[in-house]
Amino acid sequence: MTELDRPSPITRAVRGVLLAIVAGVWLIPYVWMTLTSFKSLDDILQAPAAPLPSAFRTEAYAEVFSSIPVGRFLFNTVFMATAIALLQVALALPAGYALAKLRFRSKRATFLLVLACLLIPPQVTFVPVFTLLGPVGLVNTMAALVVPFAVSAFGTFLVRQALESVPDEIIEAARLDGASELRIIYGILAPMLRPTLAAMFLFSFVYHYSDYFWPLVMTTDDHVRTLPVAVALLREQGTGVRWHVVMAGNVVLSAPVLAVFALAQRQIVRAVAAR
């Protein structure tokens, strides 16, 4: 970048202010949720829109941990989301590689079919998947939460697009050295696509970690129930909606996702910059 291409100090300042405003708009709901979790129910009923509690209380968090087994539900949720994300990354690599670098009949039709799958929400396929898993006894198991999402059309598309920018000469050189296709995919190309795969992992993890519909219909007891379902049940306990308890449950629910994002944000920025 030359001196003329660099933005002026005023441009950088305006850009920083605009970014701060956008970030503030996105953060306001989370900040309000966190502050509400420290209120008492009387504070919420008397002044629902008050930004600050009259006194910071932690009773709502104590009630969350006493009402539901947070540790078990959190483990189930993290295990489910991690397993799905890892499977999607592992299977999207060979699928994207085939669509980007191999030649076969109906390649274009296959790619269009992958794109068409992006338009189908999982709620549409709930009934057929449920009827397939029910007779074999997989309903109310971790397999029922993980297996239907092991393959990701979005992940396949993302990997395929990333591999389009990889020179074919690298693959040909690896073949001449005697590398197998699996070695090329997982040993050579996967490290080159690390930012893209990290971004894909994060998108998948956040989506399935926060998923409410599928665990709700596929689980019936606490053995495999996930934290989003359990937090939603906090609303139904007792008389009336205890918003401070619900907000405390949501803060507990969102904390692991924020931690994962903090660890993976550098890879996400690299993946976006690479585009």
Image: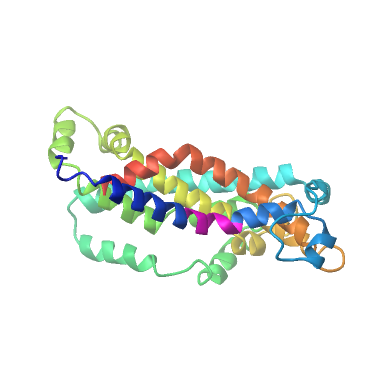
Q: Residue at coordinates 32% horizontally, 56% vertically from top-left?
A: 157
Q: Main secondary structure of the magenta part?
A: helix
Image height of 83 relative to 99, above or below: above
The x and y percentages for residue 79 are 59, 43
Tag count in the figure? 0
Please indicate, yes or no, whether residue 59 appears anywhere in the rendered image: yes
Q: Residue 75, image x and y in percent? A: 66, 42
Q: Quadrant of residue 270?
A: top left
Residue beneath the point at 64% across and 61% down = 218
Residue farthest toward the top in the current orientation of the protein: 177
Q: Is residue 111 left or right of residue 46?
A: left
| Residue farthest toward the right in the current orientation of the protein | 239
Confirm whether the magenta stretch covers residue 95: no
- Quadrant in which the N terminus appears: top left
Rendered residue at 55%/48% (across/down): 81
> Which residue is more in the foreground, 2 or 141?
2
Vertical relation: 78 (above or below) 147: above
* Residue 106 visible in image: no
Provide residue 169's location: percent of width, then percent of height: 12, 38
Report the front residue among 230 and 39: 39
Residue at 77% of width from left, 56% of height from top? 245
Q: Which residues are magenta?
A: 23-29
Colour treatment of the image: rainbow
User: Furthest residue to the front?
Assistant: 10
Residue toward you, 237 or 128: 237
Q: Is residue 239 above or below residue 162?
A: below
Q: Position of residue 24 (x, y in %)?
A: 51, 55
Pick whichever, 151 or 133, lies toward us. 151
